[in-house]
Image (tube, helix red, strand yellow):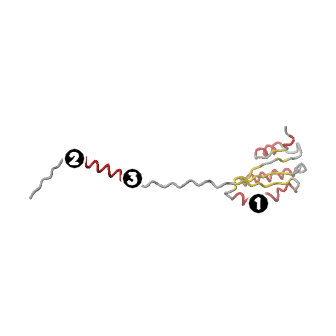
Amino acid sequence: MKKTLKYDLKNTFKAFLAGTLLFGATAASCERQPIKPDPQPEPQKRNVTIKLNGADSFGGVSQALQPDVLTPYSEDNSVDTIFIEPYGDWSWIRGPNQGYIVARLKLVRSNYPKTWGRGDFNFYPGDLSAAASLWFVDNGWTINKHLQN
């Protein structure tokens, strides 16, 4: 027995189109979107202050600014800035001793980029060279602030 099936091109096309659209919609809905992790807050960074006492020999620069003091802070990712802050009387440090202080602080600033100056050096008025004064100011310190208006 032979059966004849009706073949309607219009209905077949509609069924094909509907199936394609349904498959496309299903496939699109099955795609996984990447899961974005919740943003974690940045760990709070801290600042460290190293104080230099002008009353100490050479202002305590020799002892306070040694690599064994600065390197751990410099390598610590939780430390943002290492402030070097003078206090006490610095007016007695004159001439070559001032040159030593300036050279030592320049060495520290160049070798440890996290270091920065804060506070006031009260050197003997007019004793520090203009270039050294400008270097101190450019790196965060002030010079003889009590004498300025």
Point out the image quarter for the N terminus: bottom left
* Residue type of the residue flagged with mark 3: Ser
Q: Viewer-proximal residue, 107 or 53?
A: 53
Tell me which amino acid carries mark 2: Asn
Q: Where is residue 121 in the image (x, y as percent from the top left)?
A: 84, 48
Circle 3 is placed at which residue position? 29
Residue contact between numbered discs 2 and 3, judged by CB atoms under 8 Å = no
Label at residue 11: 2
* 94 with respect to 131 (left or right): right
Q: Is mark 2 on a helix, strand or loop?
A: helix
Question: Label 1, on which residue?
Answer: 69
Q: Which residue is pictured at 78% across the width and 44% down the height?
A: 137
Secondary structure under tag 3 reads: helix
Q: Position of residue 145 (x, y in %)?
A: 84, 43
Q: Which amino acid does label 1 sit on?
A: Val
Q: Which residue lies furthest to the left in this view?
A: 1
Mark 1 and mark 2: span between their CA atoms? 85 Å
